[in-house]
């Protein structure tokens, strides 16, 4: 079974930056062939996909983060990253990674997520 472990969150002031990491592991598993994505869930809101990177390294972003967030991947390390710049209070949420598949996700078990809080 695939395990997803997110890290790198924290408390940051508006305008600040954070870099999130998502390490994927499991027996005989590689993210090489999969699209990967970063999701976030704010209190009282549904989980949303904010950044998506295809297996051929093509990124797409939600309008709310475009120009501020950058998704990348290191297939050799089975790791996906999210560089977040110019953070805003509305970016406050728990951030998760998974593999987008149609309107759902490939991996049934989500990781614990990493909390990002943007506040002065």
Image (tube, grey):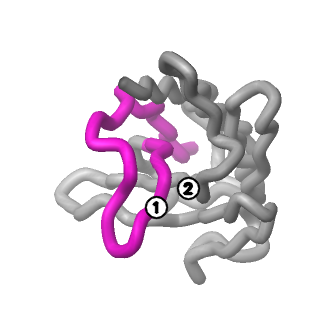
For numbered disc 1, what is the local secondary structure? strand
The x and y percentages for residue 54 are: 68, 64
Point out the stretch of residues depicted in magenta. 95-120
Horizontal side of 72 relative to 63 (left or right) equals: right
Q: Name the residue under label 2.
A: 37
Along the viewing direction, whichever of 76 and 40 lies nearer the viewer: 76
Taking the view exactly as shown, the residue that stands out farthest to the bottom is 63
Between tags 1 and 2, which lies in front?
1
Q: Nearer the viewer, residue 51 or 91?
A: 51
- Residue appearing at x 55%, y 55% in the figure: 37
The quarter of the picture where residue 2 lies is top left
| Residue 23 or residue 91, whichever sits in front | 23
Packing grade of label 2 (10 A; few <14, some 14-19, many >=20) is many
Task: Give residue 44's quadrant in the image.
Answer: bottom left
Q: In screen coordinates, is 41 left or right of 6?
A: left
Read off the residue under disc 1: 100
């Amino acid at each position: 079974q695939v395990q997803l472990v997110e890290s790198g969150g924290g408390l940051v002031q508006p305008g600040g930056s954070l870099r999130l990491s998502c390490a994927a592991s499991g027996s005989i598993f590689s993210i090489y062939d999969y699209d990967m994505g970063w999701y976030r869930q704010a209190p009282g809101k549904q989980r949303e996909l904010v950044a998506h990177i295809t297996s051929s390294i093509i990124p797409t972003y939600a309008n709310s983060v475009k120009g501020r967030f950058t998704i990348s991947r290191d297939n050799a390390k089975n790791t996906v990253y999210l560089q977040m710049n110019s953070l805003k209070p509305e970016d406050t949420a728990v951030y998760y990674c998974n593999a987008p598949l149609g309107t759902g996700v490939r991996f049934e078990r989500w990781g614990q997520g990493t909390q990002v809080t943007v506040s002065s």
